[in-house]
Amino acid sequence: MEILEFSVDGSENGIRIDRYLSEKNAELSRSYLQKLLKEQGITVNGREVKANYKVQAGDEIRISLPDLSEPDILPEDIPLDILYEDEDVMVVNKPKGMVVHPSAGHTSGTLVNAILFHCQGNLSGINGVMRPGIVHRIDKDTTGALLICKNDVAHRDLAEQLKEHSIKRRYRAIVSGNLKDDEGTVEGPIGRHPVDRKKMAINYKNGKEAITHYKVLERFGNATYIECRLETGRTHQIRVHMTSIGHPLLGDEVYGSGKNPYHLQGQALHAMVLGFVHPRTGEYLEFTAPLPEYFTNLLEKLRK
């Protein structure tokens, strides 16, 4: 059984506990949390509460997550765009709209379901049943290169490379507006937004260090095509950092203006280049995921 613990701070007073917890941990749906509340799997200050309980500053919340059995996440025959594969690792080009790993209450149609089928269960188990083989992830509407580990030895090695920021990750993005400089760096710790708990934000009090380098590739007057290089890998890092300097990604419904003249499905962001040292051979490998069709079509529209 996994135990999760949360302490409520003053800015979070009065939020319903099911909403508060789903915003604290995106992998737990509100319906699943309500089920846990009914089954006394969640306590506040050691006492059971109902789903309509409103959290108060200083509350100590404890969730007892029951162990998931293997059949909860089923292999599904979903086509994969595989950029590389050997006995230890796999690099896939994730399509737009696909969630990387299942969450409580949402256990099908994800990349994990697809790789379970493809690899016949031969994946690392370090991140548990819900995230077998997953060493890092990208957002549902972000496309591009993603690394999968087939065993625990590879997973530990690559997790350490991620921690040391030695894995090369370069993204392509289209942002709104005309960037002033041809290249630059955005620094600012990223954590939960103090008011809107579904969003991340530059948060100097509770955030973790985040650094994004960008370079302009093409200008269109009202939009700019850029390359981003990550030094760190925080949730929504590029989206938050570019918004913080006044240039949200086109199509970003969470951090943008809400206007979507190009009818995009989510942000124009693609994980293009992924480079790492192979955990078994010690050889440096680098892979490029080609730009998806929606992205190249958007560039053509902007050029016209």
Image (cartoon, rainbow, N blue to C red):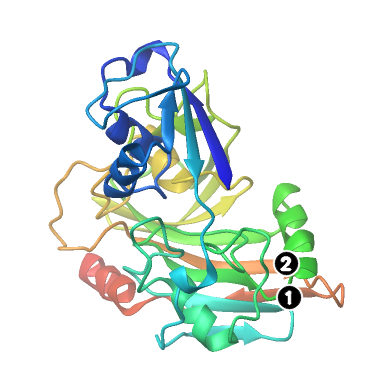
Q: Check disc 2 and report the residue beneath it.
A: 276
Residue 234 occupies which quadrant of the picture?
top right
Q: Residues within 10 Å of mark 2 (few under 14, many from 20)?
A: some
**x, y percent for residue 158:** 74, 62
Left or right? Give the position of 46 relative to 231.
left
In terms of sequence position, does the residue under pointer 2 or pointer 1 come before the other? 2
Q: Residue at x 33, y 49 (%)?
A: 32
SS type, badge 1? strand
Contact flag, marks 2 and 1 (Cβ < 8 Å): yes
Q: Amino acid at mark 1?
A: Leu
Q: In the rendered image, is residue 187 in sight? A: no
SS type, badge 2? strand
Q: Looking at this view, is 108 or 271 the one in front?
A: 108
**x, y percent for residue 218:** 39, 60
Q: Residues within 10 Å of mark 1 (few under 14, many from 20)?
A: few
Left or right? Give the position of 251 relative to 236.
left
Q: Amino acid at mark 2?
A: Phe
Q: Check disc 1 and report the residue beneath it.
A: 285
Compared with 37, 6 (above or below) is: above
Q: Looking at this view, is 39 or 16 the one in front?
A: 39
Cα distance in 3D space between marks 2 and 1 = 6 Å
Q: Quadrant of the C terminus?
A: bottom left
**x, y percent for residue 29:** 32, 48
Q: In the rendered image, is residue 133 in sight? A: yes
Left or right? Give the position of 71 relative to 104.
right
Residue 300 occupies which quadrant of the picture?
bottom left
Compared with 278, 103 (above or below) is: above
Q: Looking at this view, is 44 or 181 the one in front?
A: 44
